[in-house]
């Protein structure tokens, strides 16, 4: 595996933010920095990075995002904010196994597994909704505890 200067620069551009970035945005950023590159060159660099586990492809956006655990192939699960576009990788092996088991039961041969979940991140959710969600997640008080008052 050879990480050429162009591949390294493409990887840096993908890792620059938590938002998935498209090939043409990468191409534009390279040109702004004086690097002449053609679309096929950028796509080849992205394919290399994808094959070696450095990035994931977000199909719903035709974009790429850096992998939180680069290395061997693994499935990725992503929470993608519909408002700001940020993506968070879950990388949960239990989800990967559950999808794999169900696919095998259906006779489906999985080649690549990426789960994309759209919603609103904590920054973009209305504050009232965020508070309500936190309250539901908080452990409930028992009656004996709530009656104690010093």
Image: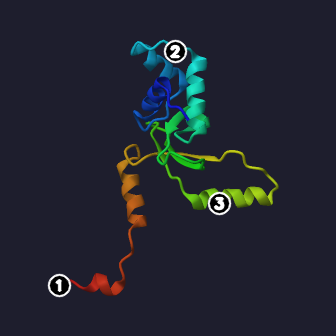
- Residue at 42% from the left image edge and 59% from the top image edge: 133
Q: Residue 150 carries which label?
A: 1
Cα distance between the residues tagged 3 and 1: 49 Å
How far from the left and from the top, in percent, is residue 96? 62, 56
- Residue at 41% from the left image edge and 46% from the top image edge: 125
- Which one is in front, 136 or 24? 24
- Residue at 61% from the left image edge and 38% from the top image edge: 51
How far from the left and from the top, in percent, is residue 75? 60, 49
Earlier sequence position, callout 2 versus callout 3: 2
Cα distance between the residues tagged 2 and 3: 39 Å
Residue that badge 2 annotates: 37
How far from the left and from the top, in percent, is residue 98? 66, 61
Categorize mark 3 by other alpha carbons within 10 Å: few (<14), some (14-19), many (20+): few
Q: Name the quadrant of the C terminus.
A: bottom left
Which residue extends farthest front?
Answer: 2
Residue 33 placement, left or right of 10: left
Residue 140 placement: quadrant: bottom left
Asked if residue 62 shows in the view, the reply is no
Cα distance between the residues tagged 1 and 2: 70 Å
Q: Is mark 2 on a helix, strand or loop?
A: loop
Q: Is residue 100 above or below residue 49?
A: below
- Residue at 35% from the left image edge and 50% from the top image edge: 127
Earlier sequence position, callout 1 versus callout 2: 2
Residue that badge 3 annotates: 97
Residue 149 placement, left or right of 105: left
Mark nearer the viewer, 2 or 3: 2
How far from the left and from the top, in percent, is residue 71? 53, 46
Which residue extends farthest bottom?
Answer: 144
Marks 2 and 3: CB-CB under 8 Å? no
Q: How many labels does the image show?
A: 3
Categorize mark 2 by other alpha carbons within 10 Å: few (<14), some (14-19), many (20+): some
């Amino acid at each position: 595996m050879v990480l050429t200067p162009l591949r390294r620069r493409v990887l840096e551009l993908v890792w620059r933010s938590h938002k998935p970035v498209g090939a043409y945005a990468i191409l534009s950023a390279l040109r702004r920095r004086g690097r002449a590159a053609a679309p096929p060159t950028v796509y080849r660099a992205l394919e290399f990075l994808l094959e070696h586990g450095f990035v994931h492809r977000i199909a719903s956006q035709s974009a790429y995002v850096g992998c939180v655990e680069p290395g061997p192939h693994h499935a990725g699960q992503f929470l993608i904010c519909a408002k700001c576009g940020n993506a968070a990788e879950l990388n949960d092996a239990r989800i990967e196994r559950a999808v794999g088991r169900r696919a095998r039961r259906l006779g489906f041969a999985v080649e690549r597994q990426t789960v994309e979940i759209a919603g609103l991140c904590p920054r973009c959710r209305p504050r009232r909704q965020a508070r309500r969600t936190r309250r539901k997640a908080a452990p409930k008080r028992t009656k004996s505890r709530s009656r104690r008052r010093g």
